[in-house]
Amino acid sequence: MTSSMNQPVPTGEQSSIPEMSEVVLEVRNLTKHFPVGSFFRPKTVKALNDVSFTISRGQVVALVGESGSGKSTTARLISRLMPPTSGEIILRGKNVLKTEPVHPSLSYRKEIQMIFQDPFGSLNPVHTIGHHIERPLAIHKMVRPSKSLERVHELLETVGLTPPDEAARKYPYQMSGGQRQRVAIARALAVEPEIILADEPISMLDVSIRMGVLNLMEQLKEERGIGFLYITHDLASARYIGDRTMVMYTGYVVEAAESRELMEQPAHPYTQMLMNAIPNPAGGLLRKKAEARGEIPSLTDLPPGCPFATRCPKVLEICKNVMPEKEYLKQDRDHWVRCHLYGSGQEPTPATIF
Ligand SMILES: Nc1ncnc2c1ncn2[C@@H]1O[C@H](COP(=O)(O)OP(=O)(O)OP(=O)(O)O)[C@@H](O)[C@H]1O
Ligand SMILES: [Mg+2]
């Protein structure tokens, strides 16, 4: 895919073609359980369970799932806004929870930046746009103070906010939602991060400006080799921008593969259900839609077996009692699924869109 954004990249910053195989961030068996309830009736919300993946230089990994499936928890753990119950986070080979167990180092906070769903909420209404971008430059000592304004202008230009001197003087309320999200991206870029965690960055924007923000992310990945964790409800945008897609349900990643492979051969019945939820004008009203049957189980009371068993149209007896292990369908596409339909000894059933 080619980017429609043609903003110049400041001299000296443009990287060569990204090395896709260079792993920058790895999370292993990330788990987050929140204690809730009262002293007499303690309960545990199992928000995230045994999640492992990598993000390489210049790779966009999309994380897709319904509300409450654990997407933001994943991003919050990686950005270290809260500690995991267990698991490991490895940045460029360094096991950060071991080497900096209590607070993330300044260098970790520089390398892993986060963009939130609500661009207005993440900007301070009493400060100018220029101030928002100058602050991280100063905290992380990215440029000499005398060069700070020049750098702010470069960053605003990079994200398509022109003329940059005018944009820098504005306040957040003087900008549209899409422009504010670009400011949030410029602020993240100010510290030249390796990874950006983008938590539903377009879901609050008008449809007409969503593509611009996605194309900007694509441009940053291609030109600067930034890796993204792109969190979304929407499989269509994951297909558009994600090199790899992971599908999450009740805190488990239930299927993962290269995005094109996942969209062409969705294996898990839940992924198939999400695929069918994408409006398809060609299918018209006659197309048989997947319906959400049954209830999503409570995260304080997950069943012993597959969490999707309560809604799955293809449920087997074993699904109700035994949690499926990861089964690889295609090693070369790194396509795996947690589903008993593809269990050991069984031939993978061709994926059917029901
Ligand atoms: N601090 C907390 N204490 C208790 N439960 C929590 C806490 N934070 C998150 N949860 C629960 O963990 C689960 C996962 O939440 P999370 O915000 O990660 O979901 P999500 O996939 O990002 O959903 P959405 O699409 O609505 O943003 C939810 O059931 C949520 O209520
Ligand atoms: Mg969320």
Image (cartoon, rainbow, N blue to C red):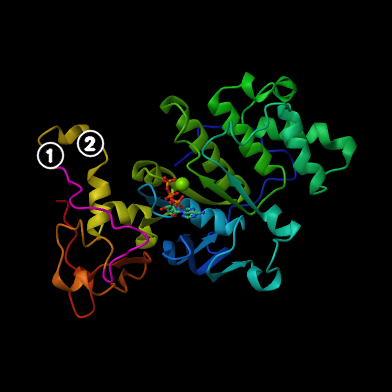
Circle 1: element type = loop
Rendered position, 273 above or below 282: below
Q: Position of residue 38 (x, y in %)?
A: 46, 60
Rendered position, 98 above or below 161: below
Q: Residues within 10 Å of mark 2 (few under 14, many from 20)?
A: few
Q: Is residue 347 left or right of residue 206?
A: left
Rendered position, 83 above or below 215: below
One can see residue 94 in this view: no
Q: What residue is shown at x 31% (from left), y 74% (from top)?
A: 325
User: In which quarter of the view is residue 11 placed?
Assistant: top right
User: In which quarter of the view is residue 7 placed?
Assistant: top right
In the picture of the structure, the residue carrying the numbered disc 1 is 287
Estimate the spatial distance between the alpha carbons at disc 2 and disc 1, rounded to whole Å.
Answer: 9 Å
**Quarter of the N terminus within the rendering:** top left
Going by the numbered disc 2, the residue's amino acid type is Asn
Q: Is mark 1 within 8 Å of ligand 1?
A: no
Rendered position, 283 above or below 326: above
Q: In this view, which residue lies farthest toward the front?
A: 40
In the picture of the structure, the residue carrying the numbered disc 2 is 280
User: In which quarter of the view is residue 297 placed?
Assistant: bottom left
Going by the numbered disc 1, the residue's amino acid type is Arg
Q: What residue is shown at x 27% (from left), y 54% (from top)?
A: 296
Q: Position of residue 164 (x, y in %)?
A: 71, 25
| Labels 2 and 1: the sequence-earlier one | 2
Residues at marks 2 and 1 touching, judged by CB atoms closer than 8 Å: yes
Q: Is residue 134 left or right of residue 238?
A: right
Q: Which residues are magenta?
A: 289-305
Label drawn at residue 170: none
Relative to the observer, which residue lies in front, 133 or 81?
A: 81
Q: Position of residue 39 (x, y in %)?
A: 48, 64
Q: Is mark 2 within 8 Å of ligand 1?
A: no
Q: Is residue 67 left or right of residue 7?
A: left
